[in-house]
Amino acid sequence: MEETSHFFTRPILLFVFHFILVSSISESDYGLERGGKEGAICAERLWTSGGTEQNKALVEQLQHYGVIRSTKVAEVMEKIDRGSFVPDGNPPYVDSPMQIGYNATISAPHMHATCLELLKENLQPGMHVLDVGSGTGYLTACFALMVGPQGRVVGIEHIPELGASSIENIQKTPAASLLKEGSLSIHVGDGRLGWPESSPYDAIHVGAAATEIPQPLIDQLKPGGRMVIPVGNIFQDLEVVDKNLDGSISIHSETSVRYVPLTSRDAQLRGY
Ligand code: SAH
């Protein structure tokens, strides 16, 4: 794939840097997501500045490597500081997924950026968005800022403790007022069923890998709407599902990825 080969042409030094940074995360962890553009982040700069500055540097690196291509995505990722979502004791500004407990991870920044870029046309002010497997709430908060107070963003997470901590995380960000006013809400439930109450959705993001695309999510997508969903088991593709205006569905694969499974709560707590 073009994106992957581009990654391998980058200076070897940056690759080594990146390798050192992520080497604490085992490849056997479900958390290691492999997008085509794993941004190698300049560690020195990230480690010597304060939180907001470090988040800005992370965004700049993702822009530099072409993962973030629009000012819209850069702006929202600057406003929603990753440091408010990564559990204490983990380096928040490294381009890697991090464990968040309950056999789940916060996605790597380059995957958050990739999904925001893919969905950005469907994240206009006033639009409706569903975030399935909302985890830490990072993307849920980004979506909410993008669609604004006239929009509607629903996050669904099946681990109640993660749902509760995601609310605390979002309260530390500029999306807090949207949570308070109700245009952003987090619900505990099985995301494979979607959330019909606020459907149809202009954008659906799924943050965990499905063995096949759940029909309720397709049904809850608006004509003209777009869903981004990782599909597969060990080998997974990030699939982009477009519902055309006549209701037909077009699907293309964007890149290879590795996400935690979209599964039942029991299976996840048992370790799948
Ligand atoms: N975008 C999130 C991803 C979290 S990892 C973030 O970056 O923080 C995926 C999440 O999906 C986990 O929190 C997991 O608990 C949740 N999940 C898995 N299967 C689910 C299901 N059937 N319904 C709801 N949430 C689910």
Image: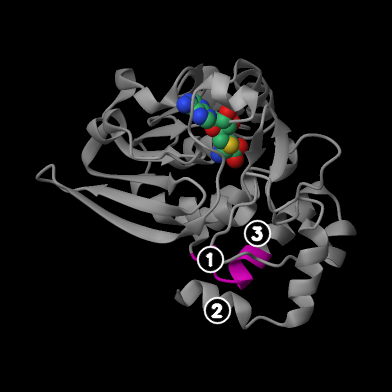
Is 65 a magenta residue? yes
Residue 194 in view: no
Q: Residue furthest left?
A: 246
Q: SS of the residue at dot 2? A: helix
Whole-percent x and y of residue 248?
14, 46
Q: Is residue 184 left or right of residue 159?
A: left
**How far apart in space, not on screen, are marks 1 and 3 (Cα)?**
17 Å
Identify the residue at image location x=67%, y=48%.
97
Q: Give the number of the disc on residue 59.
A: 3
Q: Is residue 116 left or right of residue 103?
A: left
Q: Amino acid at mark 2?
A: His
The N terminus lies in which quarter of the figure? bottom left
Per the rendered image, the range of residues in magenta is: 61-69
Q: SS of the residue at dot 3? A: helix
Quadrant in which residue 89 is drawn: top right
User: Dot 2: few (<14), some (14–19), or many (≥20) neighbours within 10 Å?
Assistant: few
Q: Which residue is mark 1?
A: 36
Q: Which residue is mark 2?
A: 6
Residue 226 in view: yes
Of the four image quadrants, the one with ligand 1 is top right
